[in-house]
Amino acid sequence: LSISKAGESEEPKDDSLVETLSDSEATISELTVEQQGRTSSITLATLGIAISVASTLVAAGNLMTRLLLPTGTSSLPMISVLTVVAATVFPKFFARISETGTALGVTFIQMFFAASGAAGSIRL
């Protein structure tokens, strides 16, 4: 696969590593990335399931922290332990929603960085 600007032609240096597009040129926005020949598994159902599972794990971790640990202890370690245990006990289930969870995680971390950056650039 060779990507070049529209109207430019770039010959690959090593044919074994790079395949050129035949009879048409494509820009980066026109290319689709497929992993091992399969399409994306992100659907509305997997989005709902991933958010529900994450919310349930967070709620259970908060509850267990309040019941089992001293007051003032952060619930993050308990949530992490519950998540690791759940992923270990149910690997096939979590494998089905892993692509969706990754997409959600990337989206939320980008929103966090955008909000942090916006707050840092506003004069008070």
Image (cartoon, rainbow, N blue to C red):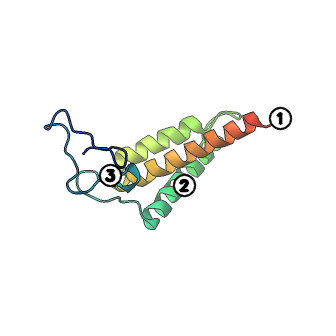
Q: Which residue is mark 3?
A: 33
70, above or below 42, in the image: above
Relative to 40, does residue 102 appear above or below in the rendering? above
Query: Where is mark 1, residue-wise?
Result: 123
In the image, what residue type sits under mark 1? Arg
Who's the residue at 52% across and 52% down the image? Answer: 54
- Say whether residue 47 is left or right of residue 111: left
Of marks 2 and 1, which one's residue comes earlier in the chain? 2
Task: Give residue 39's position: percent from left, percent from top.
Answer: 30, 59
Q: Quadrant of the N terminus?
A: top left
The local secondary structure at tag 1 comes to loop
Residue 98: image x %, image y %?
Answer: 39, 50
Q: Nearer the viewer, mark 2 or mark 1?
A: 1
Q: CA distance from mark 2 to mark 3?
A: 32 Å
Q: Residue at x 86, y 35 (%)?
A: 124
Residue projecting furthest to the left: 16
> What x and y, as percent, mark residue 67?
63, 43
SS at mark 3?
loop
How many marks overall? 3
Residue farthest toward the right in the current orientation of the protein:
124
Circle 3: is it few (<14), some (14-19), or many (20+) Cα within 10 Å? few
Return the residue at label 2: 56
Residue 105: image x %, image y %?
A: 50, 46
